[in-house]
Amino acid sequence: MQKPAFYLVNAITLYRLLAAFFLIYLVISGQPDVFKWLLALSFFTDLIDGYLARKFKVTSIAGAMIDSIGDDLTIVAGMTGMYFFKYDFVYEERISLLLLFSLFILQIILSLIRYRKISSFHTLLAKVAAILQGSFMILLFLLPQPLYPLFYLAVLVTFLDLLEEIILVILLREWKANVKGLYWILKEEKKPAD
């Protein structure tokens, strides 16, 4: 493990944790212009810290958990901004947003019951969902109209991701970080014992 890379990756993750609370402050204080740029930066740093962690091999269980918390807080901050700054859109799409929120809460509850901590699977589907969610939220605040095709694609992939994570919590007896996905878990179970 390279110490400078370790500190850099953890500093970026820590930034996202702190930025999420500042983003919520910006929403409460009614500053949508600063909010949208800081939200974009937070989503961008999410891409960077994951890439750097893999490149320099500074992944850890604690790092995966903190990264998951940072991801969730960034999404919560983005959703808070959507509610206050883009209420008409949120109201219009309330059914799909409530469905995703319900699945997310169910996945968290199941994980807390099963593992006594939140899951940090970081599946491939979760990564695609995060890119779509971040892209949509950033563009929602930067463009005059929502990009509905991107929104519906993000909803579909997030729905599939949350279902996969719920199934993984049910299947995996022990907490695991950085699981590729359900396909790989099932494939691993089918391998004959050596």
Image (cartoon, rainbow, N blue to C red):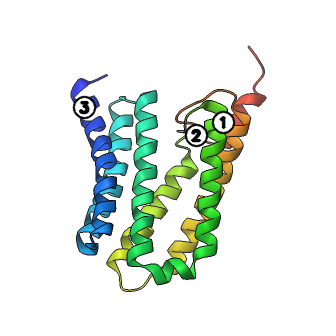
Q: Residues within 10 Å of mark 3 (few under 14, many from 20)?
A: few
Residue 180 is marked as 2
Q: Residue at x 24, y 24 (%)?
A: 3
Do labels 3 and 1 touch, CB within 8 Å?
no
- Does 185 sit above or below residue 109? above
Q: Alpha carbon of mark 3 to alpha carbon of mark 1: how far?
A: 32 Å
Mark nearer the N terminus (1 vs 2): 1
As rendered, which of 119 and 112 lies closer to the eye?
Answer: 112
Vertical order, 49 against 173 (above or below): below
Residue occupying image coordinates x 23% and y 69%? 34
Name the disc covering residue 113, or none.
1
Which residue type does callout 2 highlight?
Lys
Left/right placement of residue 16 relative to residue 185 reads: left
Residue 102 to residue 118: above or below: below
Front residue of 98 and 132: 98
> Badge 2 local density, few (<14 within 10 Å), some, or many (20+)?
some
Residue kind at label 3, given as amino acid type: Tyr
> Marks 1/2: CA distance?
22 Å
Determine whether the residue tagged by mark 3 lies in a helix, strand or loop. helix
Does any portion of residue 183 appear in the rendered image?
Answer: no
Image disc number at residue 7: 3
| Front label number (2 vs 3) | 3
Task: Tell me the element at label 2.
Answer: loop
Q: Position of residue 6 (x, y in %)?
A: 28, 29
Residue 104 % position (x, y): 60, 54
Query: Is 172 in front, or is 18?
Result: 18
- Picture quarter containing residue 108? top right
Q: Are marks 1 and 2 in contact (CB under 8 Å)?
A: no
Q: Quadrant of residue 171?
A: top right
| Position of residue 53 measured from the top left corner of the image (x, y, whole percent) | 36, 36
Mark 1 against mark 2, which lies toward the viewer? 1
